[in-house]
Amino acid sequence: MSDDLQSEFQQAAEDVQGLGERPDNDTLLKLYALYKQGSEGDVHGPQPGFFDFVGTAKYEAWAKLRGSSREDAMRRYIALVRQLLA
């Protein structure tokens, strides 16, 4: 993984904090899943319990990216953040 991609990813993670308005829930789940896949790789750990609706939604969004490369997730995360900032 290139240092340029890593630094762009970290910058996008900082930039997303400065969004003018809160994105919709679907976009927030995409951001979460792409960030986790880009920073940690495939989903791990136990799936949250049935009544943890937010935790389950996050886990499932991240699990959908299983098998995609960290680099691809980073690029997609950066592109989504740039789209939201535009």
Image (tube, rainbow, N blue to C red):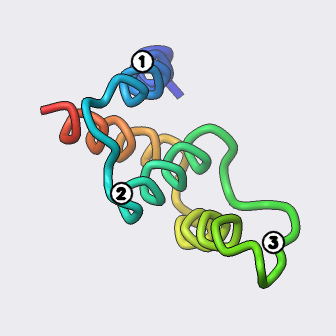
- Dot 1 crowding, Cα within 10 Å, few <14, some 14–19, many 20+: few
Q: Quadrant of residue 20?
A: top left
For label 3, the residue is 48
Q: Which mark is residue 27?
A: 2
Q: Secondary structure at mark 2?
A: helix
- Dot 2 crowding, Cα within 10 Å, few <14, some 14–19, many 20+: few
Please state which amino acid type lies under the numbered disc 2: Thr
Residue drawn at x 46%, y 16% is 7
Figure check: 46 above or below 40: below
On-image quarter of the C terminus: top left
Nearer to us of marks 3 and 1 is 3
Residue drawn at x 34%, y 44% is 22
Q: Earlier in the sequence, mark 2 or mark 3?
A: 2
Nearer to us of marks 1 and 2 is 2
Please state which amino acid type lies under the numbered disc 1: Gln
Q: CA distance from mark 1 to mark 2?
A: 18 Å
Residue 48 left/right relative to 34: right
**Residue 37's spot in the image, x, y percent?**
59, 50
Q: Quadrant of residue 25?
A: bottom left
**Residue 85's spot in the image, x, y percent?**
20, 31
Q: Earlier in the sequence, mark 1 or mark 2?
A: 1
Please state which amino acid type lies under the numbered disc 3: Pro
For label 1, the residue is 11
**Labelled pair 1, 2 in contact (Cβ < 8 Å):** no
Q: Residue furthest bottom?
A: 50
Residue drawn at x 38%, y 30% is 16
Q: CA distance from mark 3 to mark 1?
A: 30 Å
Q: Secondary structure at mark 3?
A: loop
Residue 76 left/right relative to 66: left
